[in-house]
Image (tube, coloured by chain):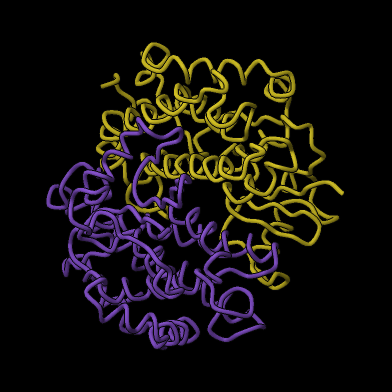
Chain colours: A yellow, B purple
Amino acid sequence: MPYELYYWDGIQGRGEFVRLALEEAGADYIDVTREPTGNGCGTPAMMKLLKGAELLHAPFAPPFLKDGELVISHVANILLYLGPKLGLAPQDEGLRYAANGLQLTITDFISEVHDTHHPIATDLYYEDQKEAAKARSISFITHRIPKFMGYFERVLMKNPHAETHIVGDGLSYVDLSLFQIVEGLKYAFPRAMTLFDQQYPALTALHAAVRKRSNIARYLSSPRRISFNESGIFRHYPELDQDPA
Amino acid sequence: MPYELYYWDGIQGRGEFVRLALEEAGADYIDVTREPTGNGCGTPAMMKLLKGAELLHAPFAPPFLKDGELVISHVANILLYLGPKLGLAPQDEGLRYAANGLQLTITDFISEVHDTHHPIATDLYYEDQKEAAKARSISFITHRIPKFMGYFERVLMKNPHAETHIVGDGLSYVDLSLFQIVEGLKYAFPRAMTLFDQQYPALTALHAAVRKRSNIARYLSSPRRISFNESGIFRHYPELDQDPA
C-alpha cells in the first residue's frame, strides 16, 4: 500500500522535506491533494482528516503522513518514522537521536524563515506587515542565517564518517533537508547568499552532492517538483533581501 | 548515574518541560547550571559542551540532556527518549508517534509564545520591539490561543481512555507539558485567560489533575521550581495582555 502524503496543494512548503525523502528512496507514495478530487484524494480529503472526526489524534496542521491506519504529523516526526524504513536514517540508535535533534533545529530555522515575511500574524497578508517583515529580515540575514548555517557547517565538518553527510556514514533525511534549506535560501535571498559557497564550503558540497543523486535529479526536473513561489515558506521579496553580514 | 539536564540558569523556559517529566517520575537528575560551578557543573560546563569541541553532534541550543555518553537536544527529542524510561509514554508504538506529534505542536506553540515579546529579533531587547510585540500579541490572543487550545481540547475530549490524559490510558509527558502551557498562559496573559476554564473544561481538568499529583505538587512548592519571570518564555507584560476574543 502506498504512503499517503497530505499537504497544501501548490507549494513546496514543509511537505517538501518529506517529498525529498520519499523521492530519494523511490518509495511508492501518493501526494494526496495533488490528485484529482474524489476517491479519497484532493484537498477535501485532507480537510476531512484535519477536522478529526475519524481520527483519535487528528493532526494540528499539514503535513501529515498516512501509512495504513497510522497517521503521523509534523515533518520531524514523519521523517523519524520513515527514515529507517527508507534507509535514510543511521543504524545506531544514538545517532538517530542526533538526526532527530538536527532535524528539529531545521524545524526551528524553517519557522524563522516563515516569520521573515509573517512576523506579526499568519492570518494577515504579507502586505499588511511589510515594515515589520523588513526589520525581521535584516536580523535574519545579519544574525540568524550565520548562526544556523555556521552551526550546520561545524557539525558537518566534524562528522568523521563522510564529507557530505551530517550524521552517520551514509545519506540521511537530514542531508536532504539541508539541501532543501540551501535551495530555499538561494531562491528567497539571492543577495544575502552571494558569499554562501565561500563561507560554507561543506554545506555547499553537501548541497551539490544531493542535487546530483539520480533519484533527486530526476525528481527536481519532473513536474512533481513544484517551483518555489510566493505562497510557500521560502518567498522571494526583493525588498526583504540585502547583502550578507 | 543521574541524568544531566543542561539549560539556562534562572528561568523555567523550555527546560521546564523536561524538569516536569523528571520530577513526576522521581528520577535522579542534576540540573547542571544550577549547581555550583566546578566539578563539571555550572553554566561554564554547559557552554563548554555547546561549543562542541568534545561532541560529534553538539546541540544548537539548550536544553539538552546527557545520559552517560549520549547527548540529546530539543525538548521533544529529550521527551521522546525519556518518556518510555520514565513510564511517561504510551506502550503502543503508534501512540508514541501521536505523543511526539502532540509534543511538536506544543513546541510550535511555545515558539509563538516567545515571539509575542520578540517578534522582530531575538538579539534585540523587548523594549526595542514593543510596538510589533503589541500587534503580534493581539493576533496571538485573538487567533492563536483559541486555535491551539481548541485543538488540544478537542483531542483531549476524544481520548476514550482517560478524561485527563491526552494520549493513551495513563499519564504521559504530553499531559505534563499541557499543564505547563496552561500555567504559563495564566501567568503571562491573565486577562486573556479569564474565560479559559469555561471555554476549555477538559484542559482545565487536566491542569488541575496534574497539579494535584504528589510529586508535581511537591516539586512546585520546592525551591527547584523557578518562578515565572520576565527573562523566560512566558512573560507578563500587562501592555501585551487584553480581554479574550
Provide residue B32's location: percent of width, then percent of height: 28, 55
In this view, the residue in front, B73 or B156, is: B73
- Report the quarter where the C terminus of chain B lies: bottom left
Answer with left or right where residue A17 lies relative to residue A114. right
User: For residue A113, which quarter of the picture?
Assistant: top left
Q: Residue at x 49, y 60 (%)?
A: B79
Quick one: which residue is furthest to the top in this view? A198
In this view, the residue in front, B244 or A154, is: A154
Quick one: which residue is furthest to the left in this view? B127
- Report the quarter where the N terminus of chain B lies: bottom left
Provide residue B241's location: percent of width, then percent of height: 23, 70
Q: Residue at x 65, y 38 (%)?
A: A89
Q: Residue at x 70, y 42 (%)?
A: A84
Q: Residue at x 66, y 15 (%)?
A: A212
The image shows a total of numbered marks equal to: 0
Provide residue B215's location: percent of width, then percent of height: 39, 81
Q: Is residue A91 above or below residue B165?
A: above
In this view, the residue in front, B40 or B132, is: B40
Provide residue A3's location: percent of width, then percent of height: 78, 47
Q: Is residue B43 above or below residue B214?
A: above
In this view, the residue in front, B126 or B80, is: B80
